[in-house]
Image (cartoon, coloured by chain):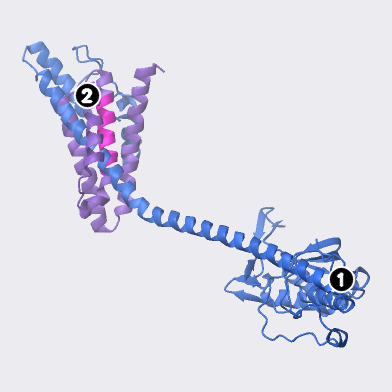
Amino acid sequence: MTTPGPPDGDHATPTTPDGHARRPTSHRPKLGAMSVSLLDNLMRNTLDEGYAQVAERRATEARTGRPGRSRAVSQALTAATLLLVGVIFGVAFRQTQQDAPASQHTRDALVHDVEQRSRESNELQRQAESLSTALADERDAALAQSQAGDATAHRLARLEAMSGLDAVSGPGIRVVLGDARARAHTDPVTGEPVVVPPDENGRILDRDIQSVVNALWSAGAEAVTVNGERLSTTTPIRAAGDAILVDLMPVGSPYRIEAIGDPATLLPNFVDSVAARRFETYVSTYGIEFQVERADRLSMRAATESVARHVDPLTDPSTTATSDPTPTAPFQTRDNADAPTPGVPQNSDTPAAGGGR
Amino acid sequence: MIPALALIAGVALGLLTEPHVPIGLQPYLPIMVVAALDAVFGGLRARFDGIFDAKVFVVSFIANVLVAGLIVFLGDKLGVGAQLSTGVVVVLGVRIFGNAAAIRRHVFRA
């Protein structure tokens, strides 16, 4: 660094005739390029040259005996400038604070709103679940009081399991379907690693999921979830822009599609299906991910209750013949029983479904 | 001591009074801050070197702030405001670092 000597006249650095302190860098070979000397100068002379010059001048003045500026004036000047510097700092701080928080405030408020609303919605969801559990318990207790009620309860449990309105668990299969990924391999010629971008056709679309789900249904699945979203009879699987929505909830790749069903038939039936074979082909053609595996125990929660568009009272002859102890006859799609149904034996044609958690 | 107090008083003044900055001047405020920082660090280093001079300090401060603002203003008019701002910040940043290093050597002798 060019630290000029102290201003007591003991010059360490020689001066050129025009009073400039000659830089110690002058012995360095000139590289010729303007930019180099510019950068060199920038890096080496970080101090304003004025200080050194004034120091020189004052040193000569001290020798010739001329008086310098008074100390008080110097102090006042410095203080005034620093005051100004401080004001600039303060104002700039205020300004940036004012500018940034305008957007930050809005964002924070929105985040707060979202968090509060989702808390409320979670709370309401819990409330609804406990209420429907209570309702199901009441209903089962009422139904258990008579023979006809028992039969109705059976039928109800079966219908609920089939329509996805009951939490179920049991053995089944799991299908993992994923978008094609970028593949990295080594270029055989250059030996450089190459990343192959995924095939655009290797993107899983909503109709791919639909066809897998339909194949599972026809292979004998009794309950199906996509990434944990239980499918009821009316659950939509559709695309919104680039996202895939299952029951209006966005799901992302890889898609885990689980199905509960008879382990002996579900897996072979599904693997033999047209859809499964097509996806096997897509694995080699487009590089999508497609795996089918047996799952010993799958638990699925109840699907969101769909709004009933059409309801009929159960017209089971055994129910209508006797005097019904429950004036509120159970409707086909009005219940969301997320609770074990004590006293209701497992129905024989829903071996996997039923017996909620 | 007095300069340090003046600096603190200035910051307090700027924070508390919230002077209105004209819209046209607002983009130059950050650059002015960097230029002012450069002048302050230069002055501090000169003080440690024992060659501080109030006039040089004042003039370097005002000139720094004005020239930095002017360069950015010109850049804005020419459509290269962002690049010139970067240039100014880089140059002043290098100088601030150099001076801070010199001050550090003076203070810690290392």
Q: What residue type is labelled 2?
A: Ala
Which marked residue is nearer to the observer: mark 2 or mark 1?
Answer: 1
Discs 2 and 1 lie in a common subunit: yes
Q: In this view, does A333 lie above or below A298?
A: below
Specify the label residue A261 is tagged with. Answer: 1
Please check the rendered image and state whether residue B41 is part of the magenta-colored stretch, yes or no: yes
In percent of width and height, residue B18 lies at 23, 44
Q: In this view, does A22 lie above or below A142?
A: above
Task: Please state which of residues A293 and A113 is positioned toward the viewer in this rendering.
Answer: A113
For residue A219, say whether it is visible: no
Region in magenta:
B30-44
In percent of width and height, residue A205 lies at 67, 74
Task: Please state which of residues A278 and A247 is positioned toward the viewer in this rendering.
Answer: A247
Q: Quadrant of residue B91?
A: top left
Asked which secondary structure carries label 2, the reply is loop
Q: Which amino acid does label 1 sit on?
A: Gly
Q: Quadrant of residue A166?
A: bottom right
- Seen from this angle, which residue lies furthest left? A66
Task: Please state which of residues A323 and B66 is positioned toward the viewer in this rendering.
Answer: A323
Chain that the image shows in blue? A
In the rendered structure, the answer to whether residue A54 lies left or right of residue B99 reads left
In percent of width and height, residue B92 lies at 31, 38
Question: The disc numbered 2 marks a residue on which chain?
Answer: A
- Disc 2 target residue: A21
What's the residue at 63%, 63% (across, down)?
A: A125
Q: Is residue A118 above or below residue A164?
A: above
In the rendered structure, the answer to whether residue A121 lies left or right of residue B84 reads right
What's the residue at 18%, 32% (across, down)?
A: A81
What's the residue at 21%, 28% (across, down)?
A: B6
* Quadrant of the drawing holding the C terminus of chain B: top left
Task: Please state which of residues B12 and A290 is positioned toward the viewer in this rendering.
Answer: B12
Chain that the image shows in purple? B
